[in-house]
Image: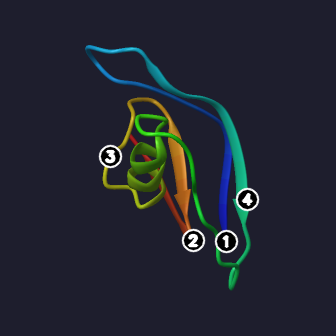
Amino acid sequence: MIDISNLNYKYKHGGIVLEDINLRINEGEVVSIIGKNGSGKSTLARLISAVTMQKDRNYFNRRNRYKR
């Protein structure tokens, strides 16, 4: 399961990309993330896969907990 609560993300030299994102994906579910160009789809995918981690936030990816 992937469980995200109150996720906010801002690029170092840019504006807010994700604001107050809440998402739960249960094991076995198939989910599509759709939206306009520049809406944060790839950023959210990177955060979910723990490729990019924001300082002082917790991320959950399946059974692993990442904190940076």
Placement of the C terminus among the 4 image quadrants: top left
Q: CA distance from mark 1 to mark 3?
A: 19 Å
Q: CA distance from mark 1 to mark 4?
A: 7 Å
Residue 63 rendering spot, x and y as whole percentages: 57, 72
Q: Residues within 10 Å of mark 4 (few under 14, many from 20)?
A: few
Callout 1 secondary element = loop
Can you identify the residue that label 4 sits on? 24
Callout 2 secondary element = loop
User: In the rendered image of this protein, does residue 46 appear above or below residue 15?
Assistant: below
User: In the rendered image of this protein, does residue 31 appear above or below residue 65?
Assistant: below
Can you identify the residue that label 3 sits on? 52
Callout 3 secondary element = loop
* Mark closer to the observer (2, 4): 4
Q: CA distance from mark 3 to mark 2?
A: 16 Å
| Three-letter code, disc 3 | Thr
Q: Which label's residue is closer to the chain start, 1 or 3?
A: 1
Can you identify the residue that label 2 sits on? 62
Tally of numbered discs: 4
> 21 left or right of 56?
right
